[in-house]
Amino acid sequence: MPGNEVLFELHGVGKNYAGAEGGKPVSVLRDVELTVRRGESVALVGPSGSGKTTLLNILGTLDRADQGKVLLDGQDLGSLDEAGLADVRNRQIGFVFQSHHLLPHLTVLENVLVPTLPMAEGAVRAAAPDRARLLLKRVGLGDRLGHRPGQLSGGECQRVAVVRAMINQPKILLADEPTGALDRNSSRGLAALLKELNREDGVTLIVVTHSMELAKEMGRVLEFGDGQLREGGQA
C-alpha cells in the first residue's frame, strides 16, 4: 500500500514548444498540479499529443518545466544543474520505454549492468552482477544471461529492459507505453511484472499508456486534456 509520504509535487507546471516556422509557441502543459505519494501506481492516459510523455520526461529529469515547480522528496528539481539532474536520474529513477533500447552487441546481463557503469561506489558496482542475476531469474530470464537481444522475443526484451531500469534500486519507475509494441499475452505479463515491483519492492510506478487494460491495473488513473490533468480518465 502507498504511504502518506509525498514523493512528487508539481505546482503550476507549464511547458511550451516553439511554433512552426517561428510561429506562436505551443502550450503542451498548463498549470499542472500533481501529487504522487511514495509507493503509488499511477497511469497517465489521454490522446496523442496531449502532454503525457512531456510530463513523464519532466518527472524523469529528461526535460525541464518552463513554468512552476517540480519537487522530488521536497527538492526543487529546477534548482539543479545538468550534473545534479543526471545524478538524480541515475540514482533514483528507472525508465522503461515502448522500444526496449537494448544494445544489440551486448548480452542480457551486460545490458542490465549498463546503468551501473557511472556509479562511483566500488561496493555498489561489485554487487551489481549478483543483483542482476537475481532480478533476471525473478522475471524468468535466468537462463538467458548470455543471450543477445536478437535471440529474444519482444516480451523477453521488455523484461530485460525492466530489470535494467531496476538495477540501481530506484525509488521511481517511469514507463512510457511499455506494452505498446507487445502482443496481448506479453502485455499482460509485463503489466503483472510492473505491478509486482510496485507492490513487493515498493517502487513508485508512473505509466503513460493508451491501454485501458494496463491503466486499470494502476491505483490511480489521470487523464490529460487541454494540457491539464483530471482524475479517473479513460484511455
Image (tube, helix red, strand yellow):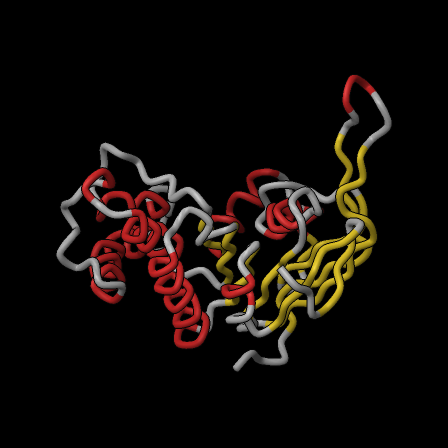
The residue drawn where x is 38% and y is 61% is 190
Image height of 203 relative to 127, above or below: below
Query: Which quadrant holds residue 197?
Result: bottom left
Q: Position of residue 199 (x, y in %)?
A: 44, 76
Q: Nearer the viewer, residue 111 or 47?
A: 47
Image height of 226 relative to 184, above or below: above
Q: Which residue in the rendered view is the most extreme toward the right? A: 24
The residue drawn where x is 22% and y is 46% is 152
- Quadrant including the C terminus: bottom right
Q: Position of residue 126 (x, y in %)?
A: 24, 53
Image height of 4 relative to 50, above or below: below
Q: Position of residue 6 (x, y in %)?
A: 65, 71
The residue drawn where x is 72% and y is 55% is 224
Q: Nearer the viewer, residue 218 or 180?
A: 180
Q: How many marks?
A: 0
> On the picture, is 139 further left or further right than 43?
left
Q: Which residue in the rendered view is the most extreme toward the top? A: 21
Q: Which residue in the rendered view is the most extreme toward the front? A: 184
Q: Position of residue 92 (x, y in %)?
A: 49, 57
Query: Which quadrant holds residue 140?
Result: bottom left
> On the picture, is 151 further left or further right than 198?
left
The residue drawn where x is 63% and y is 41% is 63
Q: Nearer the viewer, residue 185 or 230?
A: 185
